[in-house]
Structure formats: C-alpha cells, structure tokens
Image: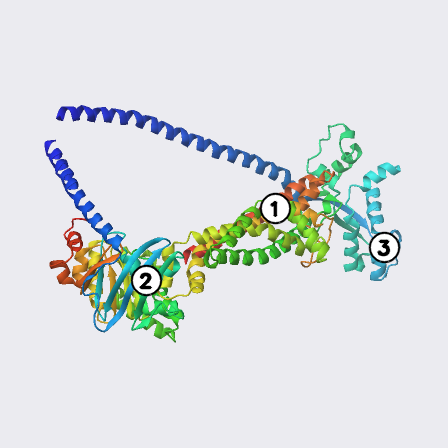
Amino acid sequence: MSAIATITDIKTQNIEGKVPMDKRSALEIESQDATDTYETIGTPRVDNAKMSARHVNVFYGEKQAILDVSLDIGRNEVLAMIGPSGCGKSTFLRTLNRMNDIIPICKVRGDITLEGEDIYKSDQDTVMLRARVGMVFQKPNPFPKSIYENVAYGPRIHGLAHSKAEMDEIVEQSLRRASLFDEVKDQLDKPGTGLSGGQQQRLCIARAIAVSPEVILMDEPCSALDPIATARIEELIDDLKEKYTIAIVTHSMQQAARVSQRTAYFHLGKLIEVGETKEIFTFPKHQLTENYITGRFG
Amino acid sequence: MNSMSDSNRSNTTAAIAASLKKRYARERRFQWYGRLAVLTGFIFLFILLTDIVIKGSPAFTQHFIKLDIDFNTEVLGISQNATAEEISGADFSAVVKDSLRTMFPDVSGRKEKKALYRLISIRAEYTLRDMVLENPALLGTNAEVWLLAHSEAGSYLKGQVDASAPESDRKVKDIQVVWLDTLAKEGRTESRFNSTFFLSGDSREPELAGIKAALYGSLFTLLVTFCLAFPIGVLSAIYLEEFAPRNRLTDLIEININNLAAVPSIVFGLLGLAVFINFFELPRSAPLVGGVVLALMTLPTIIITSRAAIQAVPPSIQEAAMGVGASKLQTVFHHVLPVAMPGVLTGSIIGMAQALGETAPLLMIGMVAFIMDVPGGVTDPSTVLPVQIYLWADSPERGFTEKTSAAIMVLMAFLILMNGLAVYLRKRFELK
C-alpha cells in the first residue's frame, strides 16, 4: 500500500515539476508570436536542393498553422520533421504536394519549388505534381481492391505501362522495392485490405513508388504499426533514399535519428531548428529543441 | 491513513455494487422492451401476411367444368365446310347452352335457364371457336370439352359459399348448388392452376381478369422511372457532394431537395397532369408520364441516400487516390463511387420500391382507367399494380376479393425480387 502511495507521490511531483516548464515555454512562444519574426536556427538551406520552401505561411480560415517557414529538402536525403502535436509538421508536408488543396479553407502563401519550378504557380497541374511527389499516409490506406490493382492503379491512370507484361513488371518491381513481393506474390489478386497493418503500409509505399515519383512524402508512416513492422519500414526508407528524396514526419525521435540525414524541429507552426540529424540530437542549439528531444514535453 | 483508504475503498465498492445492480436491471428491462417491440411488429406483419395469403391463394386456381359439346352446324348456323370467317361469326354460346340443357333437361323457365347458363364463363364460346378454327373437322361431331366455370360457380366449387345460408344472401342460388353438386359427383369439375390470372389483362368478369397488363404497366413505368431517376439522382449527388462549392446557392439546393422528399406524392401527380399532359401533350394513362412523375418523386430519396453514402466513404481513400496523382474525376469514379455503390443502390432500390407502390400521383394522370390490353410500350395506355389492386378492391363481385389479395401477393413478390436484386448487387460490389 505504501509503495503504491510512493509511486503516486513521485508521479504527482513529476507533473508538478513539468507544469512550470510548459508554462515557461508557452510564454516564450507567445512573446515570439507577438513579434511575429523569428530566425530558424541551423541550416534550413542546402545547395542543389530538390525541393525548397521559402517564407511559407499556411492558414486554416483565420487560424495560422504555419509561420514563415523556409526549408530545403536535399537530393536523395531523408529529411525528418519532428515536433509536438499540432506544430504544423504534417501541414507543411502536405503543402509539398498540394494535398491541402482538398481543404477549402486552407490557404498557402509563400514559394515552394520542385527542381526550381514553383509548384503553386497558376498553371501547375496538381495531378502532374502528385505523380512527381508521392505520398504515404499515417494510416495505411490501401484501396479496397486487389494487391495488384493497388500498385497498378497509379501507373495505369498515368499511362506508364503499354502492355500487360510491362504492368506486371512495374507491379513486381514496386512490390520488391517495398520489400513486400515475397510475402504477397501468391496472392496478388487478394484484397489489399486483408493484409496486416505493416504489410498494408508497405503496399502503400509500393503504390507510391509505382509511379516513379521524385520525392516521397511520408506522414507518420509507422504510427499505426508495431515495432517489428516499423523496423522493416525504416529499413526500407534507408534503401529508398538511393533513388528518391524523402521527407518524413514522425513522432518518434528514435526513428528520426535512425532514418534521417537532416532533422527539422517544428514548434507551434514555426520551424525552430534544422540541422544534421546527429547534431540536432546531440547538440541542440535552441532551448525548445532541447526540451523536446530530452522528453520534457511532447 | 491506510485503514481510512481501506474503508473508503469498501464504501466505494459497495456503492458501485449497488448502482451496478440498478444498471443491469435497467439494461435487462430495456432489452425486454426491445424484444416486445420486435415481437409486436412481427405479430402484425404475420397477421397481415396470413390474411393476404389466405384470401389471395384461391385466386391461383380456377375450376373447369366438362361438357359434352355437340358442334351441330345447324345450331351454329353455318355449313359443314364453312370458311374461317364464317366460323368466327358463328354463335358458339348456343352450343354451350344446348349442351347444358341436354345435361339438365328438366330446367324450364327463363330465369332458371339463365341461372343454368351462368355456370359457364362467357370465355367458353371463344374457347370453342378457337378449337374449331384450329380443327374445322370438329364441326358436326361430339366432343368432351373442359370449359372455364363462371366465377360464382367457381367460388362455390372452391368451397367459398356457405350453402346453408339464406338463398337471398348469396349469389349462387339453391338450384345452381344442386347442378354444381351433380356435376361434381359425376367428376365433371376440376380445379386447375389459374394461368389466366398471369396471362391476361383486366376484365369485368372476375374469372377472366388477370394481372399481366398491370404487371407490364408497372414494369414499363419503373423502367422509365429508373432510367431517369437513377442517373440524374446519382450524378446530382456526386456533383453536390464532391464538386459543388459550398455556398448559399448549394445550401438552398440542399434544403429544397430535403423539402422535396417530404412533398405529398399527389402533388407530383398534379404537376404531371399540368406539365406533361396539358402542356407537353404527352399521352394520358401512359407509363411514360407515370414514370416521369414517379422519377420526380423518387429523385430526392435517391439524391439524399446517395449523398449520405458518398459522404460515408473514408477520406483516406480519396487521399490515397489523390496521392498517386488521380484527378478529382478519377478519384470519384474509380474509388469513391465503387465504395459508396452499395449505399447508393440501397437508396435507389428504396426509392424504386416506393415508386412501385405509389398510387396517388398515377390516379391524377389517368392511369386509373379500365385497361384490358397489355401495353406494348411506354406510350400505350396502361395501369399499374397498386392501381389495379385499388380497382379490384373497389369492385363488388366476390371473385375480385381474392384477386385483390392475389394482386397484393404479386406486388409483394415483385418487391422481394427487387430487394433480392439489390442485395445481390450489394454483395457483388462489396466483394470487389
């Protein structure tokens, strides 16, 4: 009985110890909001970037979700975006292939370029853009169709295969690259929704790479998966960077540390710090980054 | 401190236990209410269906009476080698009457004779004429022929008439009862499946009245309704749900669609009368007009249910499709619609079922007329099943009572068939 009481006491203390810290950081942020200008610490810009965002602001109606973010994604690198819930990392990711366009009240200001081309220019075709910048979502979302159809759908609508054999080739290649082929090769005509969570997510990755995108955006791809499935996806991400440029949003700092070359820390819509992953996790320069990666809040 | 928390603990446990008992009792009580409600519904349904089946099932059989027909050329008033035209014009009712009189020679008096002739349906003369037309060699010979009984005689033979009741209370008179009993004893009566009911249109004679014209009328009407309401309804739903901007105009449209679903159906009938018949001068009583009117009535149902089904498609599927670069149209037609299809189909079938059972608006556009011929197309005058039921229910002859129930059974079979189709389609779409 007394042991339980002690544990409870410790917990209470912990919470009490945390509250002032949170309050402090919140105050800090508010004061920053007031001035509305801030400097991102680290190296948001890289040479020869695949995609670059400059002074991006995103609004949901009246509410501003992203404040003046400038960030580059280097060629064939994995960029991890971390930060507490609601910090705008997913929103930022979705501006990169204009998935935010679906939300009517969402407005994007600023410049985002892919290979130097403005993707928000008025004659930009979103279909073309999304073929070049693929996306993997938080929850595995295979189409309620066969495994084969799931992968073949993208190439088919874009007319990438001219024969059944070519399509078979693309499907097999994509599934192999997503390291799923061996598990499903005998059940390609079974519904994709019948696979396990981890397999479904790899199927979604296969679907994304089937259209040979240049960039793959991943929005917390492992948050619905168990550690083993997560490990396989992480391995896969490591392999994929040979061919693709990857931006990944994650809640797991270990994951960011394992898979990424650069890490960006977002906080309440602001890009606080960017840098080499090793550096960010060993010598964070900003107080907020340090608080977050040391687990003081998050 | 420990003992205090211990006693607190036991207090809490006791309080929870007490409230648990109450909660479980409430749940059990509620379950019983539910069972009672379901049971009540079932009992009513059972009573209704049993009543209809008991009343309607005699309509599926018909009695035939065997007569010795003498195809006497003199009685027929034609020569031995008459032409087809002459045969067609011959008086075959005379040979039927002759045959009846020979069988019951002691019948005298106009009234009694008339009662005797009323044992056989007026169809008999046409049956005989067709026989002779097919085989003119019959002329001048004798033959045993099974002829359709009159509906009143038939109803006595089916055991629907209580012969012990006072004679004035029943259509089948004492003298006819004697004749029919004699015929039955001699093995000259037989009950057969009533194919007439399915193969002919309406008639003034209950034994000759059939459902075919109304069935075809319903089929044509529903065909028109479906061809109009389904594509228009589903496309409207897709557009409003997926493409239309959200603004005042679309809000107004949405409110009006919802209101339209609540408009009494007879109003649609008035509209059909004013617009399609009086203004566009489309034919009266035609399935075309009926179908258009019912389509207008069904549209709101289809739009509302389809929109709900489209709305229920998880947004993750849309995102996935857009993520691989599908256009909005491709997203909708390749992914959203197939997933929403079971719901859309259910809604449409509900709408169609509603249209199938609708009577009021069709009365307004003249589909209530007495129509004997089976319609051959959507512009032919016709009636529909529910209107036919209404017409028969309104007829005084006893023979129509069972016809009414039988027609209801056919209507329900039609409905079950439609629902079965819907379930089948649902399953097919869900498998994919």
At mark 3, the secondary structure is: loop
Residue at point 16%, 24% (across, down): B4
Nearer to me, B107 or A102: A102
Marks 2 and 3 close (CB-CB < 8 Å) = no
Tell me how far mark 2 sits from mark 3, CA to CA: 91 Å
The residue that disc 3 covers is B90
Residue matched to label 2 = A95
Q: Is residue A262 left or right of residue B191?
A: left
Query: In the rendered view, would you say B212 is above or below B114?
Result: below
Q: Earlier in the sequence, mark 1 or mark 3?
A: 3
Q: Helix or strand or loop: what does disc 2 sit on?
A: helix
Location of the C terminus of chain B (image quadrant): bottom left
Q: Nearer the viewer, residue A229 or B216?
A: A229
In this rendering, the answer to whether A74 lies above or below B102 is below
Front residue (pair B318, B174)? B318
According to the image, label 1 marks what residue? B357
Residue B324 appearing in the image: yes
Quadrant position of residue B60:
top right
Picture coordinates of residue B47, whole percent (x, y): 57, 34
- Callout 3 amino acid: Ala
Mark 2 surroundings within 10 Å by alpha-carbon count, few (fewer than 14), some (14 through 19), many (20 or more): many
* Whether labels 2 and 1 share one chain: no
Q: Looking at the image, can residue B107 be seen? A: no
**Type of amino acid under label 1:** Gly
Circle 1 crowding by C-alpha within 10 Å: few under 14, some 14–19, many from 20? some
Eye-nearest disc, 2 or 1: 2
Distance, label 2 to label 1, CA atoms, is 53 Å
Question: Image quadrant for the N terminus of chain B?
Answer: top left
